[in-house]
Image: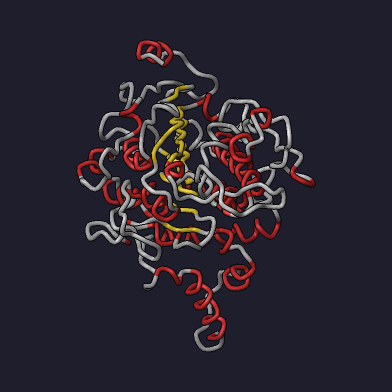
Amino acid sequence: MKRRDFIKKAGVAAAGAIVAPYLLPSGRLFASTGSQVAQHVVFVMFAGGVRQQESILQRYLDDSQGMGSSFAGNIMYNMFDGAAPTQKIVYGTGGGGISPIPKLLGSTIQKQGTLFPEVRSLSAGHYSGWNALLQGNNITTQGLKQKPVNPTIFEYLRRHGGMPASKVWFVGNGIGASLPLLNYSEHPDYGSKYGANFFAPLVTFGPKGKTHLSSAKIYHPQDELPAMYQMKYFLDNNFANVGNPLPNLKNTETEKQNIKLFMSSMFAKTQAGTIAHPPVSDNGDLQTIGYTCELMKWFTPSLTVVNMGAVDGCHSNFTGYLGALHRADHGVAHLWNYIQNNIPTMAGNTIMIVSPECGRDKTPNVIKDTNLWGSFDHSDTNALRVFTSMVGPGVPADYKVGSSTNPKGLNTDCVPTIAEILGIKSQVVNAGLLAGGTTSMFDQL
């Protein structure tokens, strides 16, 4: 789109609550340094290694299994424009996945917001990719069981934005792969006192969590010592990767009591089967999304980060990967729908950003799944290809930046973008800890 066309288009109100661009209370077209574009950000670390070919390029079985263009199509039709496949449907529900999940959104995320279809990830690995998304940098020597070296977006927001701990949350789809380490860094100017509350709902509300935590009682140190130790072992095992005592995230006493009430409520709703799960919630990612909706409704965080990872099964099960990718799209749609329809203080005042931490290889490995389809790892240059979507007030609607032949942006851009939305861009940039070439996505429009 030419600049004059964009300016012309930006003056027209989009459908519903989405306006491009959004006029801030200050009267500015876009937020300047120190002004907030929106009061809430939801950042989806999307799915666990997503090939461009099956996502943004919509090739389905054409590229991956060499079946030809007749087997192409869009299995992420809540996020992206494009028609669904018409042949060899295996990604939905029912026996053999023959029933695609109905579309939730009347207008795609792409149509409502801005799409960066060809972004470069600084890493082809999960943990280093997560670090890039959350600290705006990629330290090549940083591996598993090591906390981020540079400050995370959580710490930037809490230190420079003055946000309390209960307004900054990191929701994990589990506790493996050192995921709980990412809620704060080891940087001497930041650290645990500026960290995010980490929440892994499928662990907390799983069988062991129910046994040890659901009563939320205070144990008597003499009469119930064994029960106290059982709870300690449960918590220690959950956070074994941390390697140190659990940190003090500086939740106030009031915040701690509110978190306790939230957890108690979630145990009750879990038992009653009333968690705000997506219409289809048959895998861990979708259940994690349901608890994230509940958390947002309870705390209305300034920043909510949620990680999904079910598509990582692509290493050995391409068919399962397709189904997980389809469900991840369904989960993102439910998340956006829930914000607009069930959380009044966040509706129309939230920007959602969606970005995978890495892509996947161009050619398959030697593993065949039950359909005899090749599977894909993440180690070559194709695994550095990702997309980023952004939607909400102040974000141009139906706008695209870059293409497959003209890559635009880095996955590290998410950090200064969130910082700009929440009004601390100058502090983050001036800290001098972002990767070279990293810039807010607003600066690329």
Q: Is residue 253 left or right of residue 434?
A: right
In the depicted view, which residue is nearer to us: 286 or 70?
Answer: 70
Q: Which residue is drawn at 29% across and 58% down?
A: 149
Relative to 393, does residue 384 appear above or below in the rendering?
below
In the depicted view, which residue is nearer to us: 315 or 284?
Answer: 315
Q: Residue at x 53, y 24 (%)?
A: 111
Q: Position of residue 31 (x, y in %)?
A: 31, 28
Q: Where is residue 242 in the image (x, y as percent from the top left)?
A: 40, 68
Q: Is residue 98 visible?
A: yes
Q: Residue at x 32, y 36 (%)?
A: 420
Here the colouring is secondary structure
Name the quadrant of the N terminus.
Answer: top left
Relative to 124, does residue 141 appear above or below in the rendering?
below
Number of numbered callouts drawn: 0
Q: In this view, does 376 lie to the left or right of 143?
A: right
Q: Where is residue 195 in the image (x, y as percent from the top left)?
A: 35, 57
Q: Position of residue 350 (x, y in %)?
A: 46, 35
Name the quadrant of the C terminus.
Answer: top left
Q: Can residue 167 be seen in this view?
A: no
